[in-house]
Amino acid sequence: MSDHRKLGRELGLFDTDPLIGAGLPYWLPDGATVRHTLEEYIRAAERRAGYRHVYSPVLGKRELYELSGHWQHYGDDMYPPMDLGAEQVVLRPSLCPHHAVIYRSRAHSYRELPLRMAELGGMYRSELSGVLGGLTRVRAIQLNDAHIFCTLDQVADEAGAALEMIRQAYEALGITPARYRLSLPGPGGKYVAAPELWRRSTAVLTDVLDRSGLAYEAVEGEAAFYGPKIDVQVADGAGRESTLSTVQVDFHQPERFDLRYVGPDGARHRPVMVHRSIIGSVERAVAHLLEEHGGAFPAWLAPTQLVVLPISETELARAGELVRRCAELGLRAQLAGPDRGSLGARIREARLVPYQAVMGPREAADGRLALRLRDGRRLNPLPTGEALARIDALVRAHSTELWDAA
Ligand SMILES: [Zn+2]
């Protein structure tokens, strides 16, 4: 496995500048394409699973985080507050408080539950500059977040469904988890004190993991300050683990924010909040994908999906037509003409591009496409329309296969 920072620079995906600041990477066009594609995949998966998306601001008043408990339990990782007249606002350390407030802003009936609220939003962590680097230790984070407000009876199904979404996303992304971890509180941590709530949420998550049939380990000292969680761990090339995905059951925030729903009995009840993230932050997810695939992203995620390689100037016009045809289909194609060097050199340069179309006089004349795949396979020439339709189908299916032999 290679270092994502090295790959990111080589492939022109992202970079940092001392003038912008450490831990504040910017995304170049190819990196932005990967990120956008990943974000759209997640949003579509969430829509299919019944989530509704919201937007909420990246700032909030100090009182919001005092109410949520972040101020007391998570203050060391937060940015100092900004004074605005008589008010203080802070960059948010998580999206949960905003979502709790959005839930609270309307009355809810039990018929609306489970209410699944999702947002890919910014959050901020005041990491010290010594530990910053690449996309894994950053000060500005784009989090794939969601909160499910539900009844106690619905928690296990919702947490189980979130685990299943994680499994499907990993399949599409070609990610192999290192292990599943049940993260429990440990000695010395700044946790909210509510032993009965901790016991109940731990019991629910243990039950979800047991029913899932997944092997997992219980580890002390890794819980969130408000509750235990299921963490999906991935490992980098050096075997260092980090958490990519998470499912958490929270009885604490609904109490703090006095969240309610009206039950079938007409009385007001307290919902439970399930926090879940399918791919964690887009920064960490892209860093891990880069390392896991050595820069060879699944075709649906690759910044360039097809490179067109005309052998000589003669095929240049037809090659340009092919690139435009791909763009109309929504496929990301690029032209690498003879001005970019010998055919061999251009093929080597495009080694991470899933599909390479070498176009000589014969292909230009008969409208067929001779595809080379990134893994070295060479396909028999196909009518261009058919070849593009088959690539398009694999991309739409978020397949990790480069070609369907059928
Ligand atoms: Zn949350």
Image: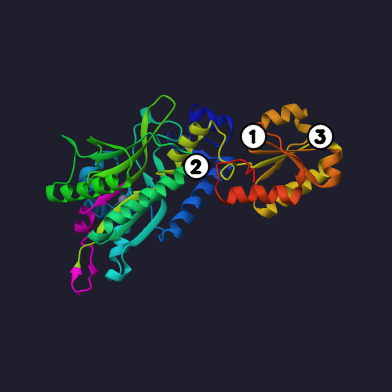
Q: Is residue 386 magenta?
A: no
Residue 331 seen in the figure: no
Q: What span is in magenta?
A: 247-268
Label 2 amino acid? Leu
CA neighbours of label 3 inside 10 A, class few (<14), some (14 to 19), many (20+)? some
1 or 2: tag closer to the N-terminus: 2
Can you give x and y, in whole percent of width and height, for residue 167 in the image?
Answer: 41, 45
2 or 3: tag closer to the N-terminus: 2
1 or 3: tag closer to the N-terminus: 3
Q: Is residue 240 left or right of residue 368?
A: left
Can you give x and y, in whole percent of width and height, for residue 43 in the image?
Answer: 47, 54
Mark 2–mark 3 contact, CB under 8 Å? no
Residue positioned 30% across, 70% down in the render: 111
Q: CA distance from mark 1 to mark 2?
A: 17 Å
Which residue corresponds to mark 2?
173
Which residue corresponds to mark 1?
374
Label 3 amino acid? Ile
Confirm if mark 1 falls within 8 A of ligand 1. no
Q: Is residue 335 above or below residue 47?
A: above
Question: Tell me, what colour scheme is on the image?
Answer: rainbow
